[in-house]
Image: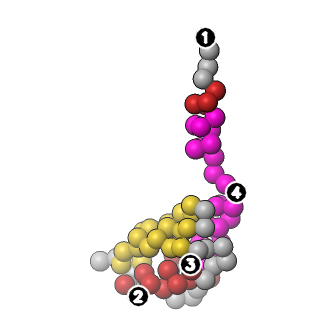
């Protein structure tokens, strides 16, 4: 029985996360948590390269934009996909 190594190598690359992404996610979450007027408890941060996706809920609409501004000021972030919703 032979194994097609080409398919194995593609699958292993897809499943691998880069440590830099984990560091960037942590840095963004820390920046959000350190900002006193924002509760990041329900904000989920995902990095894909230097692009960050914010998903989840905040208390009011003004916090949606505030979270995006804080994220953009975080070193290493180049683009933010803001999918946050105010808690209705």
Q: CA distance from mark 2 to mark 3?
A: 14 Å
Q: CA distance from mark 1 to mark 4?
A: 36 Å
Q: Secondary structure at mark 3?
A: helix
| Residue 19, disc | 4
- Asked whether 47 or 9 is in front, the reply is 9
Total labels: the figure holds 4
**Is any part of residue 66 visible from this angle?**
yes
Task: Decide: few, some or many residues near mark 2? Use Cα within 10 Å; few <14, some 14-19, many ≥20.
Answer: few
Residue found 65% across the figure and 67% down from its top: 24
Task: Decide: few, some or many residues near mark 3? Use Cα within 10 Å; few <14, some 14-19, many ≥20.
Answer: many
In the depicted structure, whether residue 52 falls above or below residue 58: above
**Residue 35, image quadrant:** bottom right
| Residue 31, disc | none
Q: CA distance from mark 3 to mark 1?
A: 51 Å
Question: Which-is-in-front pick, marks 2 and 1?
Answer: 1
Q: How far across and how far down the image is residue 78, in percent?
A: 58, 74
Q: CA distance from mark 2 to mark 1?
A: 60 Å
Residue range (magenta): 9-32
Q: Secondary structure at mark 4?
A: helix
Residue found 68% across the figure and 65% down from its top: 23
Question: Which-is-in-front pick, marks 4 and 2?
Answer: 4
| Residue 62, disc | 2
- Asked whether 34 or 27 is in front, the reply is 27
Question: Which-is-in-front pick, marks 1 and 4?
Answer: 1
| Residue 1, disc | 1
């Amino acid at each position: 029985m032979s194994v097609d190594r080409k398919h194995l190598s593609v699958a292993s690359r897809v499943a691998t996360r880069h440590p830099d992404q984990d560091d960037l996610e942590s840095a963004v979450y820390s920046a959000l948590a350190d900002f006193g007027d924002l509760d990041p408890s329900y904000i989920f941060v995902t990095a894909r390269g230097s692009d960050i996706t914010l998903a989840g809920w905040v208390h009011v609409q003004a916090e949606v934009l505030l979270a995006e501004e804080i994220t953009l000021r975080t070193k290493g972030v180049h683009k933010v996909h803001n999918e946050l919703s105010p808690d209705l």
